[in-house]
Amino acid sequence: MTINSDMLFEELYDTYYNGVYRYIFAAVKDKWNTEDIISNVFTNIYKHKDKIITVEESKNWVFRIAHNAIIDFYRKNSKIIPIEEFLDRGNEESGYEDVLVKDEFKPIRSIIDDLPKETKEMIYLRYYGGLKYREIASAVNTPENTVKSVISRTIKKIRKIYDTSTGGVINERRKV
């Protein structure tokens, strides 16, 4: 049984590491803090590897652990627990190169930063974490149809604001 749970953990790690890294980095915007947090996340998962039934069924659990680890990070590093602000902290200039916002995307990032906290979290889970709508719904405890609607309306809003403010056009195939 230990070999099976070790193999499941390795598969889970290989499958979700990059998505969890991007999700954490989007929240803390600092490479070193992200690496500390992700280490804690996967250490915690390894300690409870016997709970892994299948890799696919564990995705929400993995992202919930990551979400809680981000909150714990801010709780330990701040006198005030900025749960509603935890996506706004950090320095965008350093960190995971796949998440760095290039110059051409800075206006979009600025628009996303001005979104309500709940909406921003859904956008981050979708585009940084790579979660499906039902997985986001489970992670944020919101009906799946509401998540789909919020994300769809938000993407349209981002495109409209971007087009209006910069005169640019976002490629329909490119993810925000």
Image: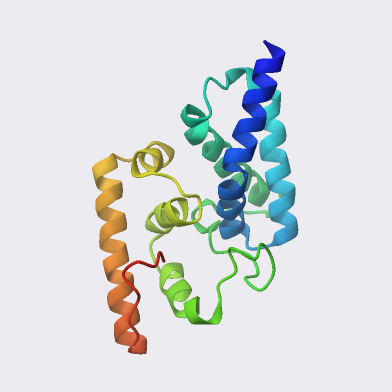
Instruction: Examine the image and state in which quarter residue 6 appears.
Output: top right
User: Considering the image in quadrants, where does the C terminus appear?
Assistant: bottom left
Residue in the image at 31% along x and 74% along y:
159
Q: Is residue 65 left or right of residue 110?
A: right
Q: Is residue 25 left or right of residue 176?
A: right
Residue in the image at 31% along x and 70% along y:
172
Residue in the image at 53% along x and 51% along y:
83
State the colouring used for the structure image: rainbow
Q: Is residue 139 above or below residue 114?
A: above
Q: Nearer the viewer, residue 130 or 88?
A: 130
Q: Is residue 93 visible?
A: yes
Q: Is residue 146 above or below residue 120?
A: above
Q: Nearer the viewer, residue 46 or 115?
A: 46
Number of callouts in the render?
Answer: 0
**Looking at the picture, how far across and down is residue 155, in whole percent?**
31, 65
**Looking at the picture, how far across and down is residue 146, in whole percent?**
26, 46
Q: Nearer the viewer, residue 13 or 78?
A: 13
What is the residue that sits farthest to the top in this orientation? 1
**Looking at the picture, how far across and down is residue 21, in whole percent?**
62, 51
Q: Is residue 48 visible?
A: no
**Looking at the picture, how far across and down is residue 115, in whole percent?**
39, 65
User: Considering the image in quadrants, where does the N terminus appear?
Assistant: top right
Q: Is residue 86 above or below residue 5?
A: below
Residue in the image at 41% along x and 57% along y:
123
Q: Is residue 27 above or below residue 72?
A: below
Instruction: Examine the image and state in which quarter residue 82 appears.
Output: bottom right
